[in-house]
Image (cartoon, helix red, strand yellow):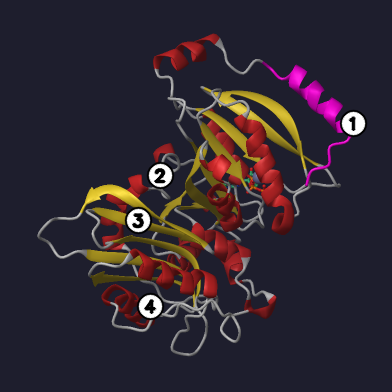
């Protein structure tokens, strides 16, 4: 919780007064031309990446590049002291308007959620003055935790939607960060960030020879067989690769269908044992059974690989066929959260319906997953519906 004392409240008021007028005349005209409907949702792109990888450089680049968007930025940086100043800027056509928001100190693991939410709630009070949000997480953040808050907060969910997760990787230190071992065999931060990314930007390519770059590329691909990988200097990237990805909604159904056909299953690398697994399976799933399948993996975490190790899914994506539904359904999962959403794409009447699923995570075994999924779809296998965690949950 953020504790607002008198002084802070005053400062806030002051900041409010000092705040420059955010909507210049040209923008008003533009607003009148293409006013978004009252229910129009604002996309949020999460920019993650290890300390110093080039996240802020990417933000600044996006803000100064030519685009037709009014972008609001939330920086969620580590800082000194108990109250960290974080900036919020609204940019229009390359001009930068800035004001400062005081947020609770971001201990990432525990309070980033609150402070992040608070920042966005504050921002949403200025609704209508921007049409895109970029959120830079701190270098050690798990973007999954940040992504989750857009899903769990229904009120926020009616205003904004998660468009995509972009992870910036440092060419020089990326491999080292990815290989870092954590106590208790936990997945390190850099690997999580790569695993969850819809776009991975390998930045600072000026600092390393091609050979190193190629090693890093291989390591990244071994973790995430789904995300797009780009290489940059100073995070200069074509913005169409960063914005409006629709990586988490039904709109991505069409592109996902194509994309899933080219997803590469990957081999473990760097001992982190995080890989991408993908399979196809024919048939129609009962929605209930599909939920049980997903919940066993993401909630109960009681699905083991052949060596008896529990599977840990970080990211799940897929197109599935649900019984008696004409439309393809997209499955999206991040850590423990998931949802099923109908896409605008219909199944072919005559053709066999094929489910396609992609999992990114630890200790994954394609055969085991596919078997379990098939059992779900055909309902020949035993479904585990108990919620007993004893002796089954992985640490
Ligand atoms: N050589 C080189 N330096 C870069 C490049 N991109 C960014 N930098 C520098 O790397 C440093 C870190 O960049 P930032 O954009 O602040 O990185 P960040 O990920 O936001 O860092 P934190 O927020 O501290 O985690 C800055 O000094 C940048 O100028 C690049 O392509 N090549
Ligand atoms: Zn930064």
Q: Earlier in the sequence, mark 3 or mark 1?
A: 1
Is disc 4 surrounded by few (<14), some (14 to 19) or many (20+) residues within 10 Å?
A: many
Magenta-drawn stretch contains 10 = yes
Q: Earlier in the sequence, mark 3 or mark 2?
A: 2
Q: CA distance from mark 3 to mark 4?
A: 18 Å
Q: Earlier in the sequence, mark 3 or mark 4?
A: 3
Rendered-image quadrant of the C terminus: bottom right
Magenta portion: prevailing SS class: helix
Q: CA distance from mark 2 to mark 4?
A: 28 Å
| Residue at image location 61% in from the left, 67% down from the top | 176
* Residue 38 seen from this side: yes
| Residue at image location 34% in from the left, 45% down from the top | 251
Look at the picture and state if 17 lies above or below 323: above
Question: Which element is circle 1 on?
Answer: helix
Q: Which residue is mark 1?
A: 6
Image position, residue 32 (x, y; %) = 44, 13
Q: Which residue is mark 3?
A: 330
**As drawn, which residue projects farthest toward the left?**
350
């Amino acid at each position: 919780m953020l504790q607002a004392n008198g002084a802070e409240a005053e400062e806030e008021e002051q900041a409010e007064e000092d705040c420059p007028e955010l909507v210049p005349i040209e923008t008003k005209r533009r607003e009148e031309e293409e006013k978004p409907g009252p229910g129009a949702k604002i996309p949020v792109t999460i920019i993650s990446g290890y300390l110093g990888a080039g996240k802020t450089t990417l933000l600044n680049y996006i803000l100064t590049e030519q685009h037709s968007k009014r972008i609001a930025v939330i920086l969620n940086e580590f800082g000194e002291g108990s109250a960290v100043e974080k900036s919020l800027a609204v940019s229009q056509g390359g001009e930068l308007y800035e004001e400062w928001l005081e947020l609770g100190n971001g201990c990432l693991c525990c309070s980033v959620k609150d402070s992040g939410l608070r920042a966005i709630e504050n921002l949403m009070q200025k609704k209508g003055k921007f049409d895109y949000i970029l959120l830079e997480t701190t270098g050690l953040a798990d973007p999954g935790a940040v992504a989750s808050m857009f899903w769990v907060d229904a009120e926020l969910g009616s205003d904004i939607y998660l468009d995509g997760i972009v992870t910036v990787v440092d060419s020089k230190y990326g491999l080292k960060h990815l290989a870092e071992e954590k106590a208790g065999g936990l997945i390190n931060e850099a690997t999580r960030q790569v695993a969850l990314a819809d776009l991975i930007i390998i930045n600072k390519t000026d600092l390393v020879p091609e050979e190193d770059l190629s090693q890093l590329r291989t390591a990244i691909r071994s973790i995430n067989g789904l995300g797009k990988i780009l290489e940059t200097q100073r995070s200069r990237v074509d913005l169409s690769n960063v914005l409006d990805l629709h990586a988490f909604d039904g709109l991505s159904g069409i592109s996902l269908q194509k994309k899933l056909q080219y997803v590469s299953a990957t081999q473990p690398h760097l001992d982190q044992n995080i890989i991408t697994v993908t399979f196809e399976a024919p048939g129609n799933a009962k929605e209930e059974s599909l939920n049980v399948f997903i919940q066993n993996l993401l909630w109960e975490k009681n699905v083991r690989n052949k060596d008896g190790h529990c599977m840990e899914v970080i990211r799940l994506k897929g197109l599935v066929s649900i019984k008696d539904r004409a439309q393809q359904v997209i499955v999206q999962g991040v850590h423990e959260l998931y949802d099923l959403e109908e896409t605008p794409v219909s199944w072919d009447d005559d053709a066999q319906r094929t489910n396609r699923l992609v999992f990114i995570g630890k200790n994954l075994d394609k055969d085991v997953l596919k078997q379990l999924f098939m059992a779900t779809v055909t309902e020949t296998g035993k479904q585990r519906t108990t919620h007993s965690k004893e002796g089954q949950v992985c640490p």
